[in-house]
Amino acid sequence: MHIVILGAGRVGALLADRLDEGGHSVSIIDQDEQAFRRLGSQFGGETIKGVGFDRQTLEAAGIEMAHAFAAVSSGDNTNIIAARTARETYGVENVVARIYDPRRAEVYQRLGIPTVATVSWTAGQIMRGLIPQGAQVEHRDASGEIVICEVQYAEAWIGREMADIEHATSTRVTFLTRHGSGLLPDHTTVLQQGDLLHLAMNSGQRETVTAVLANESGPR
């Protein structure tokens, strides 16, 4: 996958290094050429000096063939303009914007741009928004038989109740993360765009649950 990152601060540099180590093609943009010094010595991607929402800069970074775009510069306005340009002008499917003001984050979520509040998120969580990774184990009981996983889901599941998810996957919804905050749902709670879904299951269920929730047709 080709991934474009705006912002070579600590989060952007760490994200670029991790994606590069994972075998992905990476281009990282920053106005300050000195910022690229934060990248690891083994970084093999491209560095582009320029303004992140400028089309010429984005195209130099390969936005037209990008599978994902992360806007993680130090400016909320720059990040959201760049994220919307990537989504609306270039049709990039997986877009994440880092937003410092949580109140703004909720507004931008409604525009269909997943947002990340810096207070409660890390570069690893941003990666999950860019690249679906199935069921990621967050907790394992002492016996190793029961796990709590954050599980990716297809868009067809958005708008479905927790009861539908539990019935289809034979799991228990432990909690949701919504706008960066934890939420304890009941059976009638509806899954919303941008929610992170955390399920308790037997360790041997992970592949099956991942496949069920990846189904674009949703519940059967």
Image (cartoon, grey):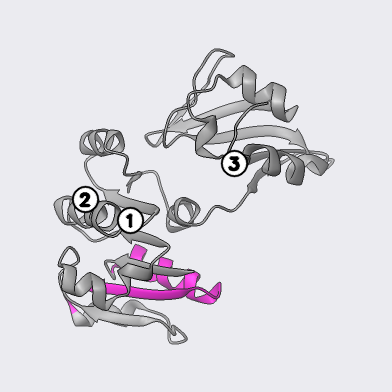
Where does residue 142 sit, x and y in percent of width and height?
Answer: 80, 40
Q: Secondary structure at mark 1?
A: loop
Q: Secondary structure at mark 3?
A: strand
Per the model, the C-alpha gap separating discs 3 and 1 is 27 Å
Q: Above or below — where is 103 with respect to 9?
A: above
Q: Which residue is mark 3?
A: 150
The answer to whether residue 216 is left or right of residue 34 is: right
Give the magenta-colored segment's residue range: 9-32
* Residue 7 falls in image quadrant: bottom left
Where does residue 186 sit, x and y in percent of width and height?
Answer: 56, 14
Q: Above or below — where is 134 with respect to 68?
A: above
Between tags 3 and 1, which lies in front? 1
Per the model, the C-alpha gap separating discs 2 and 1 is 15 Å
Q: How many marks?
A: 3
Q: Which residue is mark 2?
A: 80
* Residue 168 falls in image quadrant: top right
Which residue appears at 62% of the width and 27% of the height? 174
The answer to whether residue 117 is left or right of residue 170 is: left
Which residue appears at 38% of the width and 67% of the height? 66
Q: Which residue is mark 1?
A: 91
- Indicate the amino acid at tag 2: Ile
Per the model, the C-alpha gap separating discs 2 and 3 is 26 Å
- Indicate the amino acid at tag 3: Glu
Contact, CB < 8 Å: mark 2 with mark 1? no
Which residue appears at 56% of the width and 27% of the height? 175
Task: Categorize mark 3 by other alpha carbons within 10 Å: few (<14), some (14-19), many (20+).
Answer: many
Mark earlier in primary sequence (3, 1): 1
